[in-house]
Amino acid sequence: MNRPKILYVQFMMVGISIMALAFILFTFRVEEIKLNDGEVRSFNSGWLFVNYNGDSHSITLPTHNVPGAEKNKSSFITNQLPFDIGNNMTLSFSTYHAKVRVFVGSELIYRFGYDTQLLFGKSPACTAWHIISLPDGSQGKSIKIEICSPYDKYASTFNDITIGTKSANITNLIHRFFYSTVVGSLVLTFGITLLLLYFIARTRLKNNLALLYQSLFAISISISALTETSVLQFLTGNVLLLGYIMYFTLMLCMIPYLLFIKTVYAKHHKKLYDILCVGAALNFLICTLMQVLNILDFPETVFLTHLIIAASLILSVYTALENLLKFHDRTVLPFLIGLGTMFVLYMVDMMRYYMGIYQDGALFCRSGLLIFVVLPSIDTVSQYFSMIELGMEARVLKRLAYLDTLTQKKNRNAFEIEMEALNSQRNRSHVAIVAFDVNNLKSVNDNYGHRCGDVLILSASDVIQKSFDGYGNCYRVGGDEFVVIIEDYVANRTKACLDDFEVHLREYNQRNSNGIEIAYGYAVYEPCDKNLLETLNRADKLMYQKKAADEKPCEILENIKENANRSPLGAHIIVPRGHCHMKFLILSGKRLLTVLRCLVCGILAVFIAVQGVTAIRTFSSQRLIPIYCVKTPEKKVAISFDAAWGNEETQTLIDILGKYNVKTTFFVVGAWVDKYPESVKALAAAGHEVCNHSNTHPHMPKLVQSEMTAQITECNDKIKNLTGTSPILFRAPYGDYNNALMETVKSVNMYCIQWDVDSLDWKNLTPNDMVTRVTTTVKPGSIVLFHNGAKNTPSALPKIIEALQGQGYQIVPVSQLIYKEGYTIDHTGMQVPNSTANQ
């Protein structure tokens, strides 16, 4: 494949990767995802900003440059928590270089940065994500978030806030930074791979520093990018360390980058690269020193790093354009495309940063970084494999210089080197030489062709090798001549080898109609020999004498020709039985790297698409939600009581409800039934529903499904034994549920019930507060939560009943409020009849 086609395929695969990423980013929206452990909801409106002087004004999050906020002075935003958020909720938001305190009501529930021991610097961290647990019963209370930053631009920045369970908020952040984390991880993987290639290549090739420079750049810039996501904070918990790592890697990454460009692409202006490298090193030293001495912090000197990065990118773009336009070097095109993309997106991110948008400072640049790292990396690896290919070819050529290509035995060059080495030895008495000659090779070649001659040579080589294998080294020193050098001559063993030679030759001729004749002679080095050449000459003389005596008219040559012509190999030589013909295969580095380019880009696209969709499917798995309230056109509400511990007020509640002729639902625990069976009978006798609140009041999601089933069925059996009726409603202890519990409840043909109005009687609110809370938040279809053992419930209950009835509400048991079939439950927990849902 030629270079333009390689580029087209390369760009096409990168384009597919980008489209896959875009599909994930713009098709699946955070607000449309139902998370595994509850949904997150936006909490960005209705906030009031109050500065240190008490001046206030309304704001909507996220916002920056809020008027009135100043550095080193605490300001806060305040709001009222929603009434319908339930328990076990958390608040999630991020801050930059700021200390944080959070209050619910007057209670301090969270602080960050105030206890951090700073060795140097003014602020406790760079970007910090806060996931704050809200106390149970926080619904409707005021919340205050106080921020104090040593920098004006961060003191006046407030990011968006979400509410959800802890796992839901973490999952939301993982999804939010999924793309950023994947890209950063891929760049880091490329960097580590290049570093490994460098250490492999270092032992084989020189001048391969481009691999080292590019790997260090990819590793450092990817670490800097990853520290801006929330993932590393959740893994390490040390936001202060992550902040330092981000600034260190950002300042240092330009040094290997500039050295890489200078080594690979810069034909001129190399001094400018050296100057920028020195500038980047000085920037790191000066900024770090000022941070340590508390003169200026990294956030105050980061503009210097941004200038060096911008200057480096501009010089790189100029170098790439010069190579392309002036020197007509098309190999720089992938690098220019990646660099140009990264440069444009980097400038966009810098505009965002200096406009006051600090969240995810590498939002756009990260995409260009991936393209920039991948494309030049492929070219760098291509050059690496090309050098490896040249090295392989050199080794093969070196071997071929001393190897006979037909027989794969050592050739005359190797023979002469060996003879010279042996001649240099002072004691040569242990050396013997055996000379062989294949009879009538020239005649066979002239009369029947070289293919038949090759048959003779290969057969002779095979016979000689088998006879002297392990004792002497065989060389093909001429067209029909072979020599065996015996370095440790032993007369009896040499005679045995020659006898074996005669036997092997005879056996071969008996097995093959195309028989061969080989003459030989041997000589042992003697003191009268000036050198081993004289020994060889004596062996040759004896061999030619034998050849003259043994050479016969070759009537068998017709058979040789016939067998050669019948060979299915056509023009190829015939390889005798037992002969191992070695072949060399040299892979083309260009083809190998073409495959590598396509494979890497393809894997990148498939990996991101598959992993992205898999993650989205995981996040998007359907959340099963209990019934919190009911959508109904009638003014009906249900009052419910949980009975788990005490029993002091149960009879009082029965009497109050009887006075107003109100029937309600009591969710009772199995252990409470065992302890107070008469109260259970009294509830049933008064016409109230007695329903299931588990057997022992555990956190149900912590149980396996069989244990969940046991909790429900055992309580059902106890209630049925006393009332004669098996419950159809179940309420989870603590309001704590998950999909497994919802499926378990459904499997025993029951309905899982929560509430949308919490009286907070368990917090011992005053009767008037309870009345106000319930009557102002109730709506048609509401389910109100009380507890049978709460101290002030008997005092508040009559006023609540009178107020609700006065507003025209009919109070019914929960089972008479909910729909038994033909309904759906929306994301808020409202049970909606299908006829309404379809409208």
Image (tube, rainbow, N blue to C red):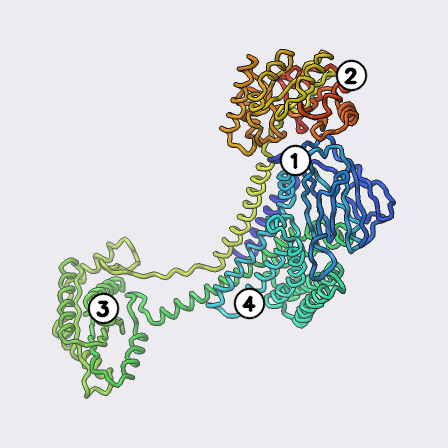
In three-dimensional space, the C-alpha distance between marks 4 and 1, rounded to whole angstroms, equals: 55 Å
Circle 3 residue:
470
Residue type at numbered disc 1: Asn
Residue type at numbered disc 4: Leu
Q: Which type of secondary structure does the marked residue at label 1 adopt?
A: loop
Residue 209, numbered label: 4
Circle 1 residue:
88
Residue 252 position by quadrant: bottom right
Kindly report which numbered mark, 3 or 1, lies closer to the viewer in this rendering.
1
Q: Which type of secondary structure does the marked residue at label 2 adopt?
A: helix
Q: What residue do we see at 63% from left, 29% from top?
A: 735
Query: Quick one: label 4 or label 2, which is nearer the N terminus?
Result: 4
In three-dimensional space, the C-alpha distance between marks 4 and 2, rounded to whole angstroms, equals: 85 Å
In three-dimensional space, the C-alpha distance between marks 2 and 3, rounded to whole angstroms, equals: 112 Å
Query: Quick one: label 4 or label 3, which is nearer the N terminus?
Result: 4
Kindly report which numbered mark, 4 or 2, lies closer to the viewer in this rendering.
2
Q: Examine the rendered structure and indicate whether residue 38 appears above or below residue 370.
A: above
Circle 2 residue:
802
Residue type at numbered disc 3: Gly
* Image location of residue 805, percent across then percent down: 77, 15
Decide: marks 2, 1 in contact (CB < 8 A)? no
Kindly report which numbered mark, 2 or 1, lies closer to the viewer in this rendering.
2
Q: Along the line of sight, which residue is nearer the eye, 289 or 201?
A: 289
Q: Which type of secondary structure does the marked residue at label 4 adopt?
A: helix
Q: Examine the rendered structure and indicate whether residue 334 appears above or below residue 431.
A: above
